[in-house]
Image (cartoon, rainbow, N blue to C red):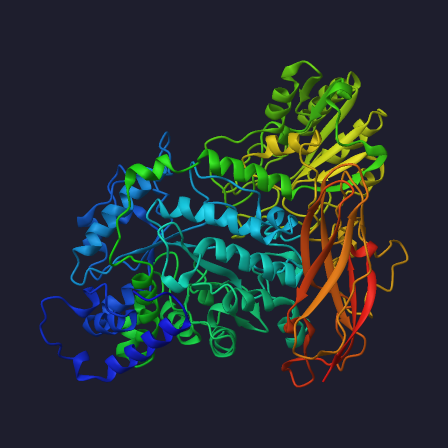
Amino acid sequence: MTGIDRRTFAKAGAAVAAAALSPAAVALPAAARPRYRDPSAPIPERVADLLARMTVAEKAAQLMAVSNKPVIQDAAGTFDPAKARAAFPDGIGHIASPSLSGLGRPGVDPTRTAGETARFMNAVQAWAAATRLGIPVLAHEESLHGLARRDATSFPQAIGLASSFDPDLLTRVFASAAAETRLRGVHLVLTPVVDVARDPRWGRTEETYGEDTFLCATMGVAAIRGFQGDLSRGLAPDRVLATVKHFAGHGGSEGGENAAPLVTGGERTFREQLLPPYRAAVEQGHAAAVMPTYHEVDGVPMCANHRLLTDVLRGEWGFAGITVSDYEGIRQLRTIHHVAATDADAAALAILAGVDVEFPDPQTYVHLPALVAAGRVPMARLDEAVGRVLTLKFASGLFDRPMVDVGRADRLTGTAAGRALAREAAGRTMILLKNDHATLPFDPARVGRLAVLGISASDTPIGGYSDKPRHVVSVVEALQAEAASGRFQVDYAVGVRLTRTRVWEENEVIPPTPAEAKALRDEALAVAARADRVLLVLGDNEETSREAWSAEHLGDRAHLDLWGEQEALAEAVLALGKPVVVLLLNGRPPAIPFIAEHADAILEGWYLGQETGNAVADVLFGRVNPGGKLPISIPRSEGQLPSYYSVKPSARRGYLDSPTTPLWAFGHGLSYTRFDVSAPRLPAGVRAGAAVTVEVDVTNTGDRAGDEVVQVYLHPAVSPVTEPARALKGFRRVTLAAGERRTVAVTLEPRAFAIVGLDMKEAVLPGAWVVEAGPGLDRLKTATLTLSA
């Protein structure tokens, strides 16, 4: 079997086209074993042979998924071959979220364990193997920060993983997630999200790798490599195929509202700042799938956007995998965008634009056979899409090894190794925003009585696209274990409750009543008054900032301040005059100017996953020295938006009533030790089009080991079109012992020096470039590099 790469898809496409024109496509000779059944045959030949045997209805079935499980299972959630045969006589192309049973009765868990999912998928594949052509089913799940299903390991949320500035960590995290996913008989995940988050009011900010183009691209590629491994030899038995989303530019919507029209600033800005992460995912990460999403770009919805899906994605970037619609995205061409009058019209628009597969259920692509018969969709386009799906199924081993070991699924899910990696990742995620008077780390012998306040200290939020891990360690649990030695005491009070429930899927968000809020605050203040120091845990939960998938299920916010009564609690606690450490557990940047000014120390954790408490204790007591950096700026208020750093030279002139600088800028992050980073050293005589290695000396001038992130920014001294005043083009995280000095090299690829010129073509720009390097935007040192033509 050959691997999954562009050549495989290209050869398959050519073979499919030839088969469609060959008499063999009409009359096939009898054979003991069809060519497509031969594991030793090249994938393109297998695809062409199978495609030539398929009816139009069977082809269309490969381009649709099944999410509505009751149509293929009995009342107990067991797969029912008879029901499946009746509902889908031409086969099933894809299964959406097989770990969800769809059983919503009281007292019945609608989720399956790993073993139950593996058993379900084995039954599905056994049924599929017995159909006329025996085409297996490709199942997919969500895996934004670990497989988002019952018992699976939950890692820090995506925005938190980005804070690590550690691509190798992401590769390890998502290799672990891939292994847990594959155990269930699932071969495709709808991850990673490489949208550039341009407005922190957007509830899906937590799903992204932040505001910077280069960081999103780098982390996205690292995640894909973790999921897929080396596809040149095919899909390994512990890896899965990755889907990059939400194509294209979903993080730049109007007003920070999910699925609203995209604010681009023009084609050049779109190509330079929003498209590069998707391009990197395709060209460097070799993602197997791309998901076009809901929003429109300059009046054209993405699921009908031929220019982006075909001309750019495939024509310019050479993408050869499959495109899968965001859930119900094709039907929304009719129901929301009104560019289609009927579901059949929507199907025609989508498939001709370049959407291969419809998720999550057959809604519009059921009309494909009729559209082909009427001549509205060419058979060649149908075959092209089906050929791509079949190529993935062959290359991932589904035809030859569709079954999984049910016993291994539960045994190897949520393992000790996974928990250890989740704890390590959470420690590398945390950002020390402020640390006046060396408040942190705590010395256990001097803590005395520690008041821990905030609902999230005991009821731990882990973010959207999560399920229930086997155990989530809360901050209170971990600190009480830390205090078990008797060296200090922990007192806990809820202090503030954010919402009545903490359920991501819940439509209505109900805050506590004012009376309830006051009672909780009064109790917390009494606890804090007896304490020697306070840990105040604030932020969001899965209801207060999340994906807004409909008008009935909102998740974006007009304001950036803390939800509910948290600010009131913080002001009252800070007024007591005790040393106060604030821990933020949240999915998007909070505007907290009062807390920023008055708290002694502030840690940004984002959502830290199932090992939240252990990781927080590691950082509070100095076993882990925080080394994370902000992947997104934290503004003073929503009045500063947009707050991303990579603005044009004419921006940020100033306001009468507010500074233009954020509370903390992109790339900010302190340490328990101190670092000195030298001015950048650059090579001489570099020609345009060559890679450039930037060197700096990093010295740990403090008294403990720690991590620093060297950040390298560029901007042209003079260019034919305006460029951002600075743009991140390279970084490297290093660990240094106390007193250690090390030369750190960051290599900038030729594309780092490219701009989209007046002709709208990308090219490397010769001439002078300003190179800035340092540990953060406020501590950069400068040198000039000249690229000769």
Q: Quadrant of residue 478?
A: top right
User: Which quarter of the image is occupied by the N terminus?
Assistant: bottom left
Vertically, is 377 above or below 133?
below
Vertically, is 732 above or below 436?
below
Image position of 600 (left or right of 353): right
Residue 608 visible? The answer is no
Q: Which percent across, then down, holds residue 23?
A: 17, 84
Residue at image location 35% in from the left, 36% down from the top: 410
Question: How many marks do you count on the picture?
Answer: 0
Residue at image location 62% in from the left, 46% down from the top: 160
Instruction: In this rendered view, identify the residue nearer to me: 171 or 706.
Output: 706
Q: Which percent across, then down, holds residue 145?
A: 52, 46
User: Which quarter of the image is occupied by the C terminus?
Assistant: bottom right
Image position of 217 (left or right of 578): left
Image position of 645 (left or right of 83): right
Q: Which percent across, then down, holds residue 401?
A: 26, 54
From this viewpoint, which residue is outermost toward the right? 656
Vertically, is 88 above or below 587?
below
Instruction: In this rendered view, identify the residue nearer to me: 191 or 682.
Output: 682
Residue at image location 39% in from the left, 59% down from the top: 359
Q: Quadrant of residue 524?
A: top right
Q: Which percent across, then down, holds residue 131?
A: 17, 58
